[in-house]
Image (spheres, rainbow, N blue to C red):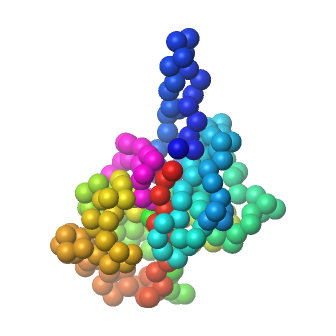
């Protein structure tokens, strides 16, 4: 069951979902990691103007952990509490680049939420890196793969404040497995798509900023 609570029904008892908070630029994503045996809580509901989701770890570095994800329309919501945070991975992020404008709900149950932490080189110029994301990386890749979307995040609170990540959202496990039958192993079809953007990983492009061999990703499933 999705952690989103149905809104109060009308006089006939009809129930409606509250409108989702879309993953648009300026939205805040708050990550609270929980143990892998944690189940969705009935109290995980709409919280004011924010929406709360339960994501189950499925593949990657932190597949043994689940994620409580709170999505707010802006960064005015103070979600991360340093006194109650149990994990150094807990953080608040702002969405700062999405490619084409986000007009649909990318957090429906069954969606793959692939979280990728970006490790920058010690001498990387962060302002120039953000320009690279806005002008090169996002226009090239955010909307290039069918049935998926890449959004870029910057941490604003937590141990990773000031660091960058991206979320690769894929509409279903079936689609993800079509592109990646095994963790980190692309299909022939994905490899063909990848030819359209692989050039951005070159040393004179992404290589100027991102440390090699430091990929940290986890795929979560929205429940």
Q: Quadrant of residue 201?
A: bottom left
54 horizontally vs 168: left or right: right
Which is more toward the observer, 219 or 73?
Answer: 219
Spot occupied by residue 97 in the image (x, y as percentages of width and height):
43, 58
Whether residue 96 appears in this view of the structure is: no
Which is more toward the observer, 6 or 27?
Answer: 6
Using the image, determine if residue 44 lies above or below residue 121. above
Chief secondary structure of the magenta portion: loop
Q: How many marks?
A: 0
Residue plotted at (70% across, 69% down): 87
Residue plotted at (55% across, 87% down): 122
Q: Quadrant of residue 210?
A: bottom left
145 horizontally vs 48: left or right: left
Using the image, determine if residue 144 lies above or below residue 9. below
Q: Quadrant of residue 104?
A: top left
Q: Which residues are magenta?
A: 96-113
Asked if the stretch drawn in magenta spans residue 119, the answer is no
Residue plotted at (54% across, 17% down): 13
């Amino acid at each position: 069951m999705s952690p989103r609570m149905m809104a109060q029904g009308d006089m006939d008892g009809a129930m409606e979902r509250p409108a989702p908070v879309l993953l648009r630029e300026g939205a805040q994503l708050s990550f609270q990691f929980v143990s892998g045996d944690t189940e969705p809580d009935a109290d995980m509901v709409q919280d004011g103007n924010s929406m709360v989701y339960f994501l189950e770890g499925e593949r990657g570095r932190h597949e043994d952990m689940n994620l409580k994800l709170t999505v707010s329309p802006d960064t005015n919501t103070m979600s991360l509490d340093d006194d109650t945070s149990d994990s150094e991975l807990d953080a608040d992020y702002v969405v700062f680049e999405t490619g084409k404008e986000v007009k649909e709900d990318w957090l429906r149950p069954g969606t793959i939420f692939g979280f990728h932490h970006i490790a920058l080189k010690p001498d990387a110029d962060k302002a120039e890196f953000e320009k690279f994301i806005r002008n090169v990386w996002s226009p090239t890749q955010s909307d290039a793969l069918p049935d998926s979307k890449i959004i870029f995040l910057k941490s604003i609170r937590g141990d990773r404040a000031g660091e960058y990540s991206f979320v690769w959202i894929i509409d279903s496990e079936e689609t993800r497995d079509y592109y990646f039958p095994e963790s980190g192993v692309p299909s022939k079809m994905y490899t063909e798509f990848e030819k359209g953007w692989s050039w951005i990983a070159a040393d004179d492009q992404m290589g100027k900023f991102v440390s090699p061999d430091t990929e940290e990703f986890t795929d979560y499933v929205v429940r």
